[in-house]
Amino acid sequence: MNRKIGFFAFGLLISSAIMAQKGVEDGSMYGHGEDSIRCLQNLSLYQPYAKQGDYASALEFWEIVYAECPASRLGIYIDGAKIKAWQWNKETDLDKKAQIFEELMAVYDQRIKYFGDHNRYPTPWILGKKALDYIQFNPKGDMKQPYEWLKAAIYDSPTANFEPAYATAFISVSRALLKDDAHKENFFNDYLKTTERLDEKLTITPAGPNNERIVGIKNGVDVLFSNSGAADCETLTTLFAERIEQNKDNQDFLDNIISLFKRVKCTDTDTYFLASEYRHAVNPTSESAEGCAYQSIKKEDYKKASEYLKEAIELETNEDKKADYAYLAASALFADKSYVDARTMALQAADYKKNFGAPYVLIAKMYANSVEHFDDPVIKRTVYWAAVDKLQKAKTVDPSVSEEVNDLISKYKEQYPDTEDIFMHPDINVGKTFRIGGWIQESTVARNK
C-alpha cells in the first residue's frame, strides 16, 4: 500500500512539474499551469504602467515576463528597449550605465531569437534599431559593430520592410570608418546600395508626407556622401570604370553611377560619359542625354550637344530641370556662335523658370559679342543698348545676378555712341525707339553715353 502511495505521489510531482512550466523552458507563449498564470498576471500588471511611461512601476513585472515567457508578446521587447533607455538615462554610475547598455543590447538579441521572423519587423529591421540604440547609448564604442548591423538592415531588408530612417545612420557610420583606407570602396558601394533601396521604397510609397520624408532622407544621404571628402573623380573612375563595362546593360546600375558622378561634379570624365552613353542606348532619359551632351561639349561639337539637350528637355518633366537643360543648350550654341538658335534656347529656359536671370545675361553677352556683324561704327554701338535692356531684365527677375549684371552694365554703357556720333545719324533720336537690325531684330530706346 505504501508503495502504491509512493508511486502516486511521484506521479503527482511529475504531473505538477509538467503542468507548471515556464515559457522560456518549453518554448510556448506563456508556459503552462501556474507559470502561465504568473506570466499573464505580470503581463497585465506591467503593460498599463509602460503605456503611461511609468517605467519605474513597470520594471519589476516586465523583468518577470522578459525572463520567464519571452515568446509571449512582441511588445515586451518594444517596451523593454524603452525601459532600458530610461534606466540608462537616470543612472549616474558609469559602470552601471555600461551594464544597462549591455542589457539593452541583449533585449534586441532576445527579440531576434523569438521574433526574428516577424512579417513586418524581421531580423534586418531589428538589427537596424539595435544599431541606432548602440550609437545613441555608446557613441564612443567601436563603430564596426553597428556598421554590420546597419548594413544588414540596408542590404537584406525586403523592400516592404525596409526602413528609410536607417539610411542616414548607415552612411554616417560608413563615412566614420573611412579613416581606414581599405573601407573606401565599401563606402562607395554602401552609398550606391542605400540610394538604390531608397528609390525602391519611393516606388511603393504613395505621394504624401511619407514619400516626402524619404525624398528628404535621400537628399541628406547625398549631402553626407558629397561632404565625405572621399568622393574625388580619380577615385570614382578607378573604382567604377571596369564595373560600368560589366553593367553596360544594367539600367539601374547606370542610373546610380550617373547620379553619383553628377553629385560629386565629375561630369567631365570619360567614365561619366561612358555611363551616359550606355544608359542612353539602353533606355534614354534626360540625365543620360545630358551626359552625352557634356561629352559633345568636351569635343567642341556644340550643335550635337544642343541636340542631346533638346532631347533631355523632351524627356524631362520637371520645369526647373528643363530650364537648366535649355540654358546649357543656349550656352553650347553661343560657343558655336549660332546666336539665333542660342537666343531661342535661352528664352525657352527663362520661360521654364520665371525667376531665372542667367538666360537674359547670356543673351546680353551674345549681343555684345556680335557687334562685328554690323559695318557702321555707330550702329555697332547701338547693340549695347539692347544688351543693357536684357541685363536690366535679368536683374528684375533674379536679384541674385545683380553683382554680375551691374558690372556688365557699367562696361557696356562705356560703349554707347556719344552725342556727336548720334548727331551724324538722323535716324537715331535719343529717347525714341530704335530698331536694331541684323540677326538681333529688336527694338530699344536710343540713348547716349
Image (cartoon, helix red, strand yellow):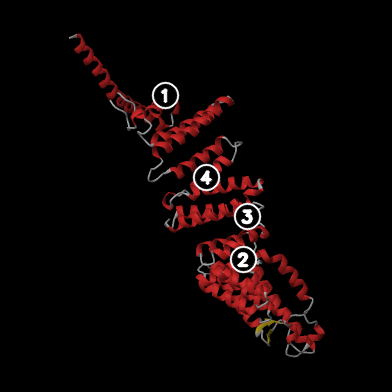
The residue under label 2 is: 272
Q: Quadrant of residue 122?
A: top left
Q: How packed is label 4: few (under 14 Cα within 10 Å), some, or many (20 or more)?
A: many
Give the mark nearer the N terminus: 1 vs 4: 1
Residue at point 50%, 62% (across, down): 252
Numbered disc in front, either 1 or 2: 2
Q: Give the alpha-carbon distance from disc 1 to disc 4, as whole Å.
A: 32 Å
Q: Is residue 436 above or below residue 37?
A: below
The dot on residue 242 is none
Q: Nearer the viewer, residue 344 or 32?
A: 32
Q: Give the alpha-carbon distance from disc 1 to disc 2, as whole Å.
A: 61 Å
Q: Is residue 428 above or below residue 394?
A: below
The residue under label 3 is: 226
User: In which quadrant will I find the C terminus?
Assistant: bottom right
Give the mark nearer the N terminus: 1 vs 2: 1
The residue under label 4 is: 150
Q: Is residue 324 above or below residue 208?
A: below
Q: Secondary structure at mark 2?
A: helix
Q: Give the alpha-carbon distance from disc 4 to disc 2, as whole Å.
A: 30 Å
